[in-house]
Structures are given as C-alpha cells and as structure tokens.
Image: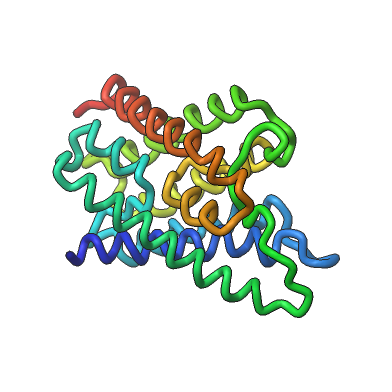
Amino acid sequence: MKKLLAEFFGTFWLVLGGCGSAVLAAAFPELGIGFAGVSLAFGLTVLTMAYAVGHVSGAHFNPAVTVGLATAGRISWGTVPGYIVAQVLGGIVAAVVLYLIVSGKADFAGVGGFASNGFGEHSPGKFSMMSALITEVVLTAMFLVVILGVTHKNAPAGFAPLAIGLALTLIHLISIPVTNTSVNPARSTAVALFAEPWALQQLWLFWVAPVIGGVIGAIVHKLISED
C-alpha cells in the first residue's frame, strides 16, 4: 500500500507541476515561461519526487515506465496493474485540483485543450499522427534506456533522480511542438478527461506509443547492459 501511495502522490505532483505550468504559466502575459519553462517543470517534478519517494516505490509515476521495468525484469509483472491504477488515479486527482484552480479565473470560459496531447490539427506544430507515433515511441524508449542505466547496480549512487529528471526535461524540449509531450499515459489520461472531446478521441495513441516505447527501451537496455 505504501508503494501504491507513493506512486499516487508522485504522479499527482508530476501532473500538477508539469501540466499546471503549461496551463497557468506557459503563455502568461509578457512573462510566460514558454516551452523551456514547461520542460523544466516536468523534469523537476520527477527529480523532486524521485528523491522524495523513490526509496519507497522506485518512482515510476508512469505506466510506460512500469511496463518497461517489468519487461527488463526489474519488477514483477504482478505489481504492474496496481502501479498503473495508482498512477492514473494520482494524475486524475491532480487534474481535478488544476481544474478547480483554472476555473477560478475571472474570465474563465472553459479549459480548452488543458495541456492535452494531440496530433494532426491538435498538435502544437500540426504534426501528423505518424510523426506523433514515432516521437512518442522513440522518446519513451530512450527514457527507459536512461532510467534502466542510471538505476543499474554499477551506476554511480545517488544521481539517478537527477539524470532521470534532466532526461524528461530534454524529452519535452524536443517534443512539445509535436505532441505536447506525453511519454506517460497517466499524464495524458488525467487532463484529457477535462479537455475538449478531441483529447479523449486521440488518447489511444498516448497509451499505445509510450507502452511500446517502454518495451523497446527495456530490450535495448538488455542488449547493451552487463546484467
């Protein structure tokens, strides 16, 4: 139960911090933080919570990471469903909190896209479904390569959260224009529930692609690792 709670609160923080920065601060008049700021916010959420609760649950906060770690043999497949449920619920609760904050704005007229992930006309840069699929698969795979590498028994101790947080920052710097960056089905699901209808219609890609990427990343790690 402690592990599941850690995953719940870690994913809550990721969605509130990352999506919250995108919704509230990215385009704030004149002093918005922009893509770079949102990228850093997502990285900081993982970095801080990995240090805070990584010793409890392993700090996945992401169904694709959980599946990737199970594929690599780091965790048992029996723990996967519970972790994923906790992650999705944590993300949804964060989206509820964010919605309550946003709806308190004086000129509130709906949440719009609500930092949802999309492709085609709903991609920030109008990238195609194929571009979105490739982006999410490749970047999630590389995320898993980093995670599995820096948490390896022979890796320098104590630096894993820093490397993982910076990797997620880099991933966002690359892919926000393409998909608004998912690499995390829990994050995508949470905000899609409150956004315009298109977000739920396109949500399938942001489950399929990251999970495939997580499995590929685990396979790549096995090919190059000394395990």
Query: Which residue is outermost to the right?
Result: 30
Q: Would you say 224 lies left or right of 142 here?
A: left
* Residue 35 located left or right of residue 29: left
Asked if residue 142 shows in the view, the reply is no
Q: Position of residue 226 (x, y in %)?
A: 22, 26
Residue projecting furthest to the front: 197
In the image, 188 versus 22, the foreground residue is: 188
Residue lying at the far top of the rendered structure: 223
Among the 4 quarters of the image, the one containing residue 177: top right
Q: How many marks?
A: 0
Q: Is residue 90 above or below residue 189?
A: below
Image quadrant for the N terminus?
bottom left
Residue at point 40% right, 59% down?
11
Relative to 8, say whether 144 is above or below. Answer: above
Q: Residue at x 43, y 53 (%)?
A: 162
Tell me how the rendering is colored.
Answer: rainbow
Q: Is residue 151 in sight in this rendering?
A: yes
Q: Position of residue 22 (x, y in %)?
A: 65, 58
Q: Quadrant of the C terminus?
A: top left
On the rendered structure, is 155 left or right of 137? left
**Residue lying at 31% horizontally and 35% vertically, measured from the top left:** 68
Measured from the top left, where is residue 149 in percent x and y? 33, 36
Point 37% across, 55% down: residue: 88
Comparing 42 with 96, the one in front is 96
Q: Is residue 166 above or below residue 112?
A: above
The image position of residue 111, as x and y in percent, is 66, 62
